[in-house]
């Protein structure tokens, strides 16, 4: 039985999880500097302890609406290879241990094209937890725009 540590966060009323090793930190969502001509899901850039990072709105990226800044809103600072960025989430919930046996593959027919971003679904307490494949989210061809941002 393999156990994986997962950071749980909320988008709208759904819970999502990402492997803890892909998360650098969780920060308060404060001001983001807009970048002209960036795709709408790229909210802009931030200066995080001297490092300039792009920020994307995960809700907008997944077609779930547009994030609004609230007291619980957070930036999940994620990194995959050379790409490091902030992901806007409605709320960071918890870090949990997830047993590999409790993870089912994503039901592609039910999820549609966003299933490429999802590697599984797990039952957590009384909720379903959608497990994101950040490697796919961060390497998607549409995110080439991030590499084009000049600061």
Image: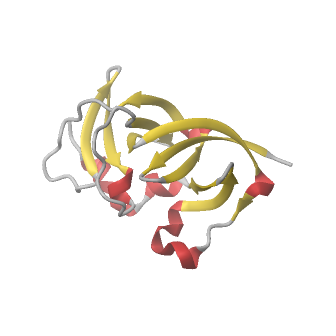
- Foreground pick, 138 / 16: 16
Residue sticking out furthest to the left: 36
Seen in the image, is 148 located left or right of residue 100? left
Q: Can you say whether 16 is above or below 75 in the image?
A: below
The foreground one among 74 and 84 is: 74
* Residue 73 % position (x, y): 37, 37
Say which residue appears at 68% left-offset and 66% top-offset: 105
Left or right of residue 143: residue 1: right
Q: Is residue 88 above or below residue 128?
A: above
Q: Position of residue 34 (x, y in %)?
A: 17, 41
Q: Which x, y percent locates residue 93?
A: 54, 37
Q: Position of residue 24 (x, y in %)?
A: 51, 31
The colour mode here is secondary structure
The residue lying at 56 percent from left, 40 percent from top is 22
Q: Quadrant of the C terminus?
A: top left
Can the viewer see residue 83? no
Q: In the picture provided, is 62 more to the left or to the right than 33?
A: right
Q: Tally the marks.
A: 0
Q: Nearer the viewer, residue 11 or 34?
A: 11
Pick whichever, 114 or 72, lies toward us: 72
Against 114, residue 40 (above or below) is above
The single residue placed furthest to the front in the displayed view is 126
Residue 102: which quarter of the image? Answer: bottom right
Q: Residue drawn 61% across and 72% down? A: 107
Furthest-right residue in this view: 1
Q: Is residue 79 visible?
A: yes
Drawn side of residue 24 relative to residue 47, left or right: right
Q: Residue furthest bottom?
A: 109
Residue at the spot 50% in from the left edge and 58% down from the top edge = 136
């Amino acid at each position: 039985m393999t156990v994986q540590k997962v950071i749980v966060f909320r988008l709208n009323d759904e819970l999502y999880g990402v492997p803890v090793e892909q998360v650098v930190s969780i920060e308060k969502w404060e001001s983001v500097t807009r970048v002209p001509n960036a795709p709408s899901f790229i909210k802009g850039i931030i200066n995080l302890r001297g490092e300039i990072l792009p920020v994307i709105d995960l809700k907008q990226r997944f077609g779930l609406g547009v994030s609004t800044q609230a007291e619980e809103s957070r930036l999940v600072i994620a990194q995959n290879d050379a790409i490091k960025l902030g992901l806007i989430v409605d709320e960071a919930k918890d870090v949990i241990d997830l047993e590999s046996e409790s993870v089912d593959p994503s039901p592609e027919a039910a999820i549609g094209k966003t299933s490429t971003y999802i590697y599984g679904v797990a039952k957590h307490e009384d909720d379903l937890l959608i497990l994101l494949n950040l490697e796919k989210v961060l390497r998607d061809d549409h995110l080439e725009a991030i590499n084009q941002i000049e600061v």
